[in-house]
Amino acid sequence: MKLAFQGEPGAYGHEAARRLARAFRLSPDLNSHDVGVVPCRTFREVLERVASSAPRRERGEEGVIGLVPVENSLTGSLHEVYDLLLEFAERVRLQIVGEVEQPIEHKLLGLPGASLDAIERVYSHPQALWQCRRFLDELGVETQAFYDTAGAARWVAQQRHKGWAAIAGPLAAELYGLVVLREGISDYPHNATRFWAVARPNRASQRPLGGAEKPDDAPGPWRWKWKTSLVLELPHVPGALYRALKIFAEHGVNLTKLESRPVRTEPWRYRFYLDFEGSLHGPSARAALQKLSEYAQRLRVLGSYPVCEGPP
Amino acid sequence: MKLAFQGEPGAYGHEAARRLARAFRLSPDLNSHDVGVVPCRTFREVLERVASSAPRRERGEEGVIGLVPVENSLTGSLHEVYDLLLEFAERVRLQIVGEVEQPIEHKLLGLPGASLDAIERVYSHPQALWQCRRFLDELGVETQAFYDTAGAARWVAQQRHKGWAAIAGPLAAELYGLVVLREGISDYPHNATRFWAVARPNRASQRPLGGAEKPDDAPGPWRWKWKTSLVLELPHVPGALYRALKIFAEHGVNLTKLESRPVRTEPWRYRFYLDFEGSLHGPSARAALQKLSEYAQRLRVLGSYPVCEGPP
């Protein structure tokens, strides 16, 4: 079993991979340090690794599960990821098989022996610098954008300059031998990213991760729920979205998210990405989707999967 | 009258400013070369220029109208712009007063005397390079990312290297003395960006631009319609969005767009940006908004304005 994510070792995607391994018991060791990880340069590369993993599995080798961030609580959805997921769902029937919510705990990391007062320059991803703006302004330091938080931590560790620091997560500190100079530096107390685990349908993990068929069967002490994600294209008539939502409401199916994205081949037409609570296989969800498929011009289920919301 | 936009002179925002001036007859000269423009570095700077323009107007000087791109037909909504508009609507009651749809017609621009076969390197904004990927691959040239399409055109004009070219729009060619080496180079035939014109409410242009109260009164030969944009925060209960859309449907109000954005202070809660056809002052829109304001936790109208869809 290998887990692919975007970023350098120690990136938040790497933290999410470990969290997934623990939550879904992918490894006998619950710390999951022994689950292999595949750092990738881009989100597309993550999905390509998953797509090309199936043939190797058929030769008896281990499969690859991909981790992609789908939404951050501060910055919203990652539309590039949505567009890629639809592409790979259609091309190789890749499916979402699980979700974890990864807390984003930015920390200021420096070399052992460095002191907060002597820091002159801070490296990190532009989003992380923006989220810690108030702390950085008070500290009065120069900031330098880096392509990746964990990459910034590695850079600071390699350069061995005690006046330099990086903003990254706890795993980056651990992997590159840095110390935490200050934690709780974000302007926003609630910062978390939802990651989707994606896999090929012809793998054992086509069934949701961990083999749990209902949230009740899922391993504790995590909080669990079941969710389904789908893509809809509707007739181009007034009230089309209202009619679609009405079908869900009449069947008691609760939507938790709705995103619109342009259909590139037709100007000012949209497709909708929807999440609803519960499994695709529940009777009300099944009836709603049956009715919806008669109305929609296109309907594709991206996955029906257990969501791990972290330890209680 | 001055029009502020983001980008260098010759950017697509500058083309949209000219289009707005022509469509809404802001200038006696319909070519509107004499409407003053204010190129800005960022979207925030555009809105700051608008916000600070009112006091000067009270001293008898000209006001500033800002142009911001809100949606592209290929890449979708500009969420940064949505978030900024809400901030400025609340802070200084800035309003949307008009909309134009600007075709994005990427062209390969070179120095006079340059030949397409001899081009080795092409500069442009990463989005434009991505949108012309097929053409660039066939041409087999090196590409260089630039912060702005018009900035790339100016760079090529200044460097005077006949093997270098830029991808930008026709206005950039005109302003920097470049020639069109090839047009129609985009992978996507339909590429257009919607720009919103924004102004202070205490200006004459608080009434929609051009003084037209209904689309019928608007100057020809452009196609016109009326539109209203608003922001909604709904109770955090199942079916809340469905109930909100039901109010519109029951009053015969046709939604044309719906976007969700995270509420940063509360994880996994959303606010919705909606557009509907017609003026805020029509009886059905008024009744729908009255009912909606009783249900919503927050409702703010960003503007009710004429939309110019370009010459027929």
Image: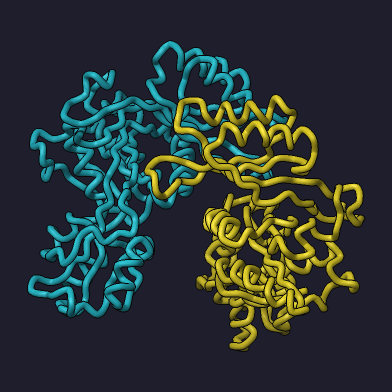
Chain colours: A yellow, B cyan
Nearest the eye: B5 or A193: A193
For the N terminus of chain A, the image quarter is: bottom right
Residue A200 pos. (x, y %): 69, 63
Compared with residue A44, is residue A234 higher up or lower down, i.e. above or below?
Answer: above
Going by the image, does A255 lie left or right of B189?
A: right
Can you see residue B46?
yes
Identify the residue shown where x is 18% and y is 64%.
Answer: B182
Can you see residue A142?
no
Nearest the eye: A312 or B123: B123
Identify the residue shown where x is 73% and y is 59%.
Answer: A102
Residue B277 pos. (x, y %): 40, 25
Nearest the eye: A46 or A50: A50
Q: Quadrant of residue A2?
A: bottom right
Going by the image, does B129 lie left or right of B164?
A: right
Nearest the eye: A246 or B96: A246
Going by the image, does B268 lie left or right of B128?
A: right
Identify the residue shown where x is 20% and y is 60%.
Answer: B183
Q: Quadrant of residue A194?
A: bottom right
Total marks shown come to 0
Identify the residue shown where x is 48% and y is 47%.
Answer: B79
Compared with residue A222, is residue B26 higher up or lower down, i.e. above or below?
Answer: above
Going by the image, does A134 lie left or right of A53?
A: left
Residue B225 pos. (x, y %): 31, 26
Residue A149 pos. (x, y %): 61, 71
Compared with residue B7, is residue A48 higher up or lower down, i.e. above or below?
Answer: below
